[in-house]
Amino acid sequence: MNICLNDKIFEVLCNVVTSENVRAYVIGGWVRDCLLKRNHADKDIDIVVIGSGINIARKAARKIDPKIKVSVFKNFGTAMFKNAEYEIEFVGARKESYDRTSRKPVVEDGTLEDDQKRRDFTINALAISINKETFGEFLDPFGGVEDLKKKIIKTPLEPDKTFSDDPLRMMRAIRFATQLNFTIEENTFKSITENVERIKIVSPERIVTELNKILMCEHPSKGFILLEKSGLLKIILPELENLRGIETKEGKTHKDNFLHSIKVLDNISKNTDNLWLRWAALLHDIAKPVTKKYLPETGWSFHGHEYVGSKMIPDIFRKLKLPLNEKMKYVQKIIDLHLRPIVLSQELVTDSAVRRLLFEAGDDIDDLMILCEADITSKNEAKKTKHLENFKLVRIKLKEIEEKDAVRNFQPPVDGSEIIEAFGIKPGKEVGIIKNAIREAILDGIIPNEHDAARKLMMDKGKELGLIPAVTDALS
Ligand code: CTP
């Protein structure tokens, strides 16, 4: 018995294709991941049918659960359905490309081998028969099993042909190499370097799906190095490519900020599965090239790169069709604040500086600390240990102040409507001035984060501005 067909679902599919008298195979990711003993994403099963995939999909769905809705894509000769456990896609074997997002209908019927050679990589072109008489038989005309053993990503056809059928496959090659820790075969990689321009015809949405998958790998740096080496990076994310390289002046050299950024990304990946924190790590120094200056007294400076970097994010996200919502704002905020804990760890920390950071970071303070710790990439172990020790102290200080003052997510204890009522005024400039004074006084530790103290300050500040209390205030 073939272990890849252990799931009960294959028995059902076997009965359907056998009684319909068509040949069918499970192919692609399911087979690859089974042989690698890897958990296959979302239990996606791809079935290729020598005949009508749509007919088999309908029959199989009826057998599994008559209520299942089958989605049919006539132009592509595919159909799919899902139940609680599986998502199964059926496709008729064909001679044409597998680019499902292309508008070009693909109709020409083909043999199994025609179908296999139109797939992206040998390791994704392995098929296993699900017909009764040949159940479990491997069909591997392009040496996919061997390439799985050798850990190689290779196209079944001449790579130029495979990549021109769907240029996204250049990104997929790099994504699989990163996910599986495989090597891209020399000829295949060479072809990527020669075809990079073709990535421009692929939609940003598809590109970013691959980028996100690379970011979620155990060692994402591998993917970014390959993207850089192949020439894809400068097309899809030129801002990151610009971080590459070092410069020396008067014997002073700055670090390669591309290598640093992907090292930080690897570091943070050990401690978080949050995709957006990984994006923040990748882009945290993105403004270093535009803020770079050489100062004869002190050497290289990237003054303000955290602020300028956070301002560059909307443009980058827009181009990549990443969400422009609170996820983007989170990335901006983390980048904007990424130097603050370092400053706190180096100087004598005042309560008010800690309070301000807690106030600005809110609930994202823990994520910010994770980034700061990942940001220490010094090769000098003693230096690294010292920084990490300092961060431990910052964490203790953050905890103490939070327990004492509860300023994380704090709303000033006196709000605008209370100010308006107290002085019988209309909303306007004065309300803002008083609110600001209260917030600053609390953050600076001049008054406690409590209502009575804030109200007293409100009365004093109002009088200073020439406002007259509407009612006699017991506290004024
Ligand atoms: N495929 C292809 N070219 C593409 C996309 C997909 O040849 N651009 C083929 C491959 O044979 C692949 C199968 O379609 O194995 C299914 O594609 P997909 O679901 O995108 O990938 P999986 O291989 O299942 O892997 P993952 O789920 O990790 O993306």
Image: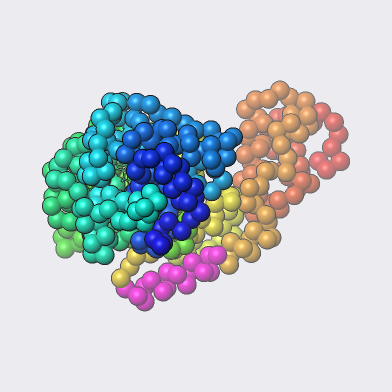
Q: Quick check: 424 above or below 325? A: above
Q: Is any part of residue 74 visible from this angle? A: yes
Q: Quadrant of ligand 1?
A: top left
Snapshot colouring: rainbow
Q: Is any part of residue 423 visible from this angle? A: no
Q: Is residue 424 left or right of 382 when viewed as pictured?
A: right
**Residue depicted at x 36% and y 40%:** 22
Q: Quadrant of the C terminus?
A: top right
Residue 180 appears at what percent x and percent y?
Answer: 33, 59
Report the magenta residues as a range. Answer: 380-395
Q: Quadrant of the N terminus?
A: bottom left
Q: Is residue 18 left or right of 100 when viewed as pictured?
A: right
Q: Is residue 385 magenta?
A: yes
**Residue depicted at x 47% and y 62%:** 271
Q: Quick check: 331 above or below 265? A: above
Q: Quadrant of residue 186?
A: bottom left
**Residue depicted at x 69% and y 60%:** 404
Residue 192 appears at what percent x and percent y?
Answer: 18, 46
